[in-house]
Amino acid sequence: MSVSEAQALTSLLEGPATPSRLAGRRFLARSTISRLLERLDGEGWIRRRSDPADGRSAQVVLTAAGRRTAHRVLAASYSRLSRLLANIDESNRADVVRAPRLRRGCTCLPTSLPSAPARVCWSLA
């Protein structure tokens, strides 16, 4: 799974989005998001539906498999971040997690971390 695919999936945990809105969230060109969505659709992780507010446009929503995969992506990201921060003392760890450079454009980072790294499987398969 590419970083862009992982980011798109986790972004859709926030709720349905039009392809244009999803492209804006991920700072991607419309043509790039179209190819990305085709790959996610091919994996069975998303589906498209009519936008209830505007029948002329479509929304992208996670399937049950997509939601499970997005949660595994978040768990793996959380685990990696926990391991990276494990050697930073607790009083400084919260500052690092809140650092704008780490959080810029990422809605998936937790606002706090446990004192010990989480044990999560790295495999997304």
Image (cartoon, rainbow, N blue to C red):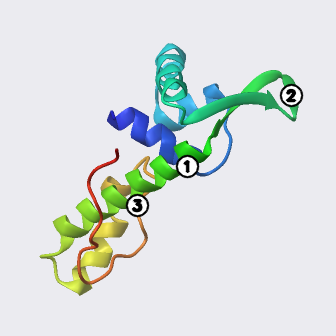
Mark pair 1, 2: CA separation: 24 Å
Residue 67 has which mark?
Answer: 1
For residue 16, above or below residue 18: below
Mark 3 or 1: the one toward you? 1
Mark 1 or 2: the one toward you? 1
For residue 108, above or below residue 42: below
Q: Position of residue 21 (x, y in %)?
A: 63, 32
Q: Earlier in the sequence, mark 2 or mark 3?
A: 2
Q: Amino acid at mark 2?
A: Asp
Q: Position of residue 80 (x, y in %)?
A: 24, 60
Q: Residues within 10 Å of mark 1 (few under 14, many from 20)?
A: some
- Judging by the rendered image, the residue that carries numbered circle 3 is 109
Residue drawn 86% across the image and 35% down it: 52
Q: Are marks 2 and 3 in contact (CB under 8 Å)?
A: no
Q: Amino acid at mark 3?
A: Leu
Q: Residues within 10 Å of mark 3 (few under 14, many from 20)?
A: some
